[in-house]
Amino acid sequence: MLDGGIFDAQTRALAPYADISVADITNGDSVEQIAANVLLTSPSRFAMAGLSMGGIIGLEVWRQAPERVTHLALIGTTPHADDPARSRERRIQVAAAHEGGLREVLIGSLIPRYLADKHRGNRELQQSLLEMGQRLGARVFERQSTALMSRPDSVPTLADIDCPVLVLCGRDDRLCSMAVHQMMANAIRRADLVVLAECGHLSPVEEPESVSHALKRLLERTR
């Protein structure tokens, strides 16, 4: 439930080095379909960075077209399928959003878990996140939740990835733990692991300069 604004700082920082675009992951109700949509609108070869659900889509993009992905950044994400408890929670949230309660879901259930303690008092940042979610709306929330609930387990894919990879997380990420990112970095043969202190799930806006620097270093690596 975030739009391209989540990467504004990285788009500005990397503009001198790359032609940047933000893929649309709001259409489709399965990870496989969303990844196919991304491939339809992407260059023949490209570097891809994905945050959270975007990282899940990134792994599926690699699975569908590995020859097209030159570099991959997996940021605040997980290769695991949804667990039953999280799927139950998603269904409750979707039902609430469908009844007009999307704002309450975003404020009460999602945004508080996104940010590290250091950033939870940042009202301007929280308002920006809320506005992104509200712009996308309940229908997108339902489609994305459905896709996440039915997503495949991508752990077996990790060992096959052979391009340069950045695995980046915040040490205080409440949704996708540092241990999961360490596992991914160990499983991917050409992965660099970056862990940001005092940072939660949304590192591109919590620690924008550090994320931009890590992405620039990734692009400098040769395939």
Image (cartoon, rainbow, N blue to C red):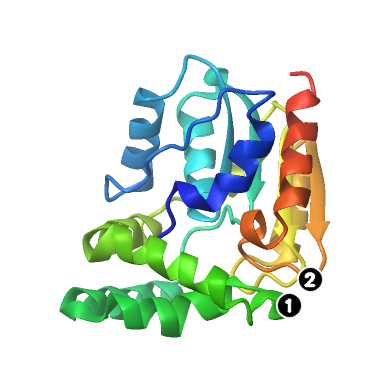
**From the viewer's perspective, is 163 left or right of 43?**
right
Q: In the image shown, does 177 or 215 lie closer to the viewer?
A: 215
Mark 2 or mark 1: name the one nearer the start of the chain: 1
Residue 131 vertical position relative to residue 59 in the rendered view, above or below = below
What is the three-letter code of the residue carrying label 2?
Glu
Residue 63 vertical position relative to residue 45 in the rendered view, above or below = below
- Residue at image location 39% in from the left, 66% down from the top: 131
Location of mark 2 (residue): 198
| Local SS, label 1 | helix
Number of other residues with Cα within 10 Å of mark 1, as a class: few under 14, some 14 to 19, many 20 or more: few
**From the viewer's perspective, is 43 left or right of 147?**
right
| Residue 118: mark | 1
Instruction: Report x, y in % for residue 116.
Output: 68, 75
- Residue at image location 63% in from the left, 58% down from the top: 205
Answer whether residue 184 is visible to the viewer in this image.
Answer: no
Q: Are marks 2 and 1 in contact (CB under 8 Å)?
A: yes
Instruction: Report x, y in % for residue 3.
Output: 42, 51
- Residue at image location 43% in from the left, 85% down from the top: 108
Outermost residue, front direction? Answer: 124
| Local SS, label 2 | loop
Among the 4 quarters of the image, the one containing residue 40: top left
